[in-house]
Amino acid sequence: MRKTTLTSAIAGIVIGASLIFQPTALALPPANNSSDVVDDAIAQSIASVANAPRMEENFAGLVDLQSKPPLSDAHIPEFFASDSWYPTTAPQDYAQPKLVKIVAEEGLRLERWFIESPAMRRVVELQVMRAPDANKPAPFLFALDGASAPSTSGWLRKGNLAQSLGSQQVTVIMPVQASGSMFLDWDQYDNKIQQPKWETFLTKELPTVMEDPSQGLNFNGKRAIVGLSMGASGAVRLANANPNYFHGVAGLSGCYSNSTQMGNWLTKSIIQSVGADDRKLFSPQDRVRMDPVANPTGLKNMPVYLFTADGYVTDTDIANFRGRKQYELAGGVVLEYATNVCTQELANSMASHGMQHQKVILQDGGVHDWHYYSQQLPLAWEHLAPSLY
């Protein structure tokens, strides 16, 4: 019974994917088997669907995504959008960025900052973990969330950020309420998520507030950015487009291109998973500017850390997904397979541009899951930190 149910869930993902994929010789990885009888049924279900003859049909190349209708019309399973939240207030006009208030929250030196944003036309909320020693200068680390990006950062809920970085002399800034936004500037207003302007907010408006010495953060002038999944895509794009602002970047299981089939597919899927229209994201100029795979030269003078697994289901994955919604594991397979392709695209592009400084981890085994990102965060920080002091 469990096997049938999971197979149906995966089949739904495959059917949804078939609406945007064309035939080529490409298949999802099979699952490793578990010794547990019930879990073995799960693993075998994934393996049977992944290796089915139609898989090469359904998971392959991509059609021209700009000519396709929104994925929401195709009823793509919404495994991206759990715990999603977005502001619903009407857009407001502000003359300049302004700190409204700071509220202490439960957690290690954790605060919530409320900032009026002229670009975003709303009050933007950030969760901030102050550095442990207020008397010593500290860099800023922006930590971007995944596609749901609700009012409490996933890095705090699931990413063990406080445990990994709590003793480090760094101020961590976690933007929230960014569901499906890609953490970029949108070209047009969207009825679901308004008109995000994350690049403008993070690189132009926020410094006037948070880097003001009166706020007591003792900023040392150095900034790095890290993200997972949607946040990884945003982090690498922002760092590449703003090389004089950021001094290091880490992308964990992201897609980074606007010019490759897989990059386009995952960007489109993330945006439409929250009901927004991906056609409103990029202006023609930003579609080119925000494509690190096409031109990664903005990354040449900063440390770069990239991680992805390959979508193969391990016994650890089966144990970690026990008790969760069954389609989540199937979604984790699909997403991590996609980000594996995307990460290799970026790594290959950097290499072709003569770059050798990047650290790229292509992990054997593992799906799209916070279990891996919480492990990778301290490793990414270790790679970035020497450039920030």
Image (spheres, helix red, strand yellow):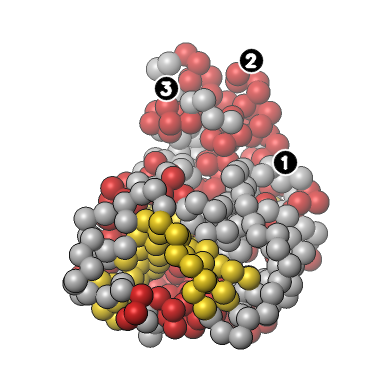
Q: Position of residue 288 (x, y in %)?
A: 59, 80
Q: Position of residue 2 (x, y in %)?
A: 60, 18
Residue labelled with disc 3 = 34
Q: Residue at x 45, y 28 (%)?
A: 318
- In the structure shown, which secondary structural element does the residue marked by tag 1 occupy? helix
Q: Position of residue 53 (x, y in %)?
A: 65, 36
- In the structure shown, which secondary structural element does the residue marked by tag 3 occupy? loop
Establish if 336 lies above or below 349: above
Residue labelled with disc 2 = 1
Q: Is residue 240 visible?
A: no
The residue type indicated by label 3 comes to Ser
Establish if 366 lies above or below 248: above
Residue labelled with disc 1 = 15
Dividing the image into 4 quarters, which one contains the N terminus? top right
The residue type indicated by label 1 comes to Ile
Dot 3 crowding, Cα within 10 Å, few <14, some 14–19, many 20+ = some
Give me the C-alpha separation between circle 2 and circle 3: 17 Å
Figure quadrant of residue 349: bottom left
Task: Name which of mark 2 and mark 3 comes first in the sequence.
Answer: 2
Q: Position of residue 80 (x, y in %)?
A: 60, 47
Establish if 210 lies above or below 365: below
| Labels 1 and 2 touching (C-beta < 8 A) | no
Dot 1 crowding, Cα within 10 Å, few <14, some 14–19, many 20+ = some
In this rendering, would 275 be left or right of 7?
A: right
In this rendering, would 253 be left or right of 27?
A: left
In this rendering, would 287 be left or right of 107?
A: right
| Labels 2 and 3 touching (C-beta < 8 A) | no
- In the structure shown, which secondary structural element does the residue marked by tag 2 occupy? loop
Q: Residue at x 44, y 79 (%)?
A: 209
Figure quadrant of residue 68: bottom right
Task: Name which of mark 1 and mark 2 comes first in the sequence.
Answer: 2
| Labels 3 and 1 touching (C-beta < 8 A) | no
